Image: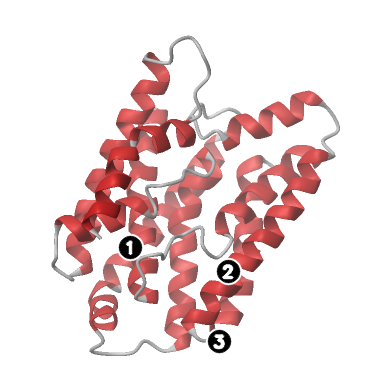
Amino acid sequence: MLSLLYVIISGIALPVGGIQMQYLWRNQLGDVYSLGLGSAACLGAAAATMSGWCSLTVGSFICTLICTIVCFFVTLRVSTQSLITFGILFGTFIGSLGTIVVTNAPNGDLLKQYYLWGAANFNMEGVTAGDIVFSLCLFAGGLAAALLDSRRLTSHFRGEIELSKLHKALSLLAIMFLVTSAVSICGPIGFISLGVPNLSRILCKKEDIRIHYTISSAMGVALLLITYLVVKYVNFGIYLPISATMAIIALPLMAILFIKK
């Protein structure tokens, strides 16, 4: 039941965070991992696993928070276009640090533990009750912030208003809470934070972000649930990571995106 709960949470948190990024940037390439949040989560998880100084989920959250704070101050000083470029470069830097940490793993068991988390298979290995409570609080706070800010985000996306850099920076913090609620427990999950929001905007031309919250969440949960069931029951006797399997299943959806565009 706990695994299914996080299938639902991840299916909501990642697409909602993705559509927020697209509305903030007015860019269909907006993604929760664009600013290095995914790489930071992996670095924090790797450092916590290899050193044992805290739980994997806490390490993931702390490192993601530091990454977001850096992006917070950068957002106050640069344009959106420059922020996208910075995010790509910063994410590469963080990913390189993570590679160094993982490569120097003290033993194979710790390395396996890290990679099983990164496979995002909802096995909940090493997750404590405190981790779950903390994660649920992050999810509730991030989702509440998304709903409260929906009207202003819609107006900003339409060009009716221009959000201040401080507002954008605070929105990044709220998105980080939402995304980290899933990633810190289950590991990074690709596609649904970028592909699903774009598919939602193709299927529904309305610009009200609240509509896309609903559509993206429904599609995200459905796609992630199908992938989870395939990985769990139709795995052909081999270990299938969630992210890799979802990329294969989602290929027709990606084709729709390209054909429509």
Q: Amino acid at mark 3?
A: Val
Callout 1: 10 Å neighbours few (<14), some, many (20+)? many
Total count of labels: 3
Residue 252 placement (x, y as % from top left): 28, 39
Callout 2: 10 Å neighbours few (<14), some, many (20+)? many
Name the residue rendered at 43%, 73% in the picture: 171
What whole-number distance in Å separates the C-alpha atoms at marks 2 and 3?
A: 12 Å
Q: Earlier in the sequence, mark 1 or mark 3?
A: 1
Q: Amino acid at mark 2?
A: Gly
Determine the image quadrant of residue 48: top right
Q: Earlier in the sequence, mark 2 or mark 1?
A: 1
What whole-number distance in Å separates the C-alpha atoms at marks 1 and 3?
A: 21 Å
Q: Nearer the viewer, residue 250 or 10?
A: 250
Q: Nearer the viewer, residue 22 or 181?
A: 22
Q: Which mark is residue 87?
A: 2
Callout 3: 10 Å neighbours few (<14), some, many (20+)? few
Q: Nearer the viewer, mark 2 or mark 1?
A: 2
Residue 212 placement (x, y as % from top left): 22, 60
Residue farthest along the front direction in this orientation: 259
What whole-number distance in Å separates the C-alpha atoms at marks 2 and 1?
A: 17 Å
Name the residue rendered at 52%, 73% in the picture: 84
Q: Which mark is residue 78?
A: 3
Residue farthest along the top direction in this orientation: 237
Residue 19 placement (x, y as % from top left): 33, 62
Q: Earlier in the sequence, mark 2 or mark 3?
A: 3
Q: Nearer the viewer, residue 65 or 140?
A: 65
Horizontally, residue 226 falls left or right of residue 187, namely left
Q: Which residue is mark 1?
A: 19
Q: Amino acid at mark 1?
A: Ile
Give above or below for 157 relative to 12.
Answer: below
Name the residue rendered at 73%, 54% in the picture: 96
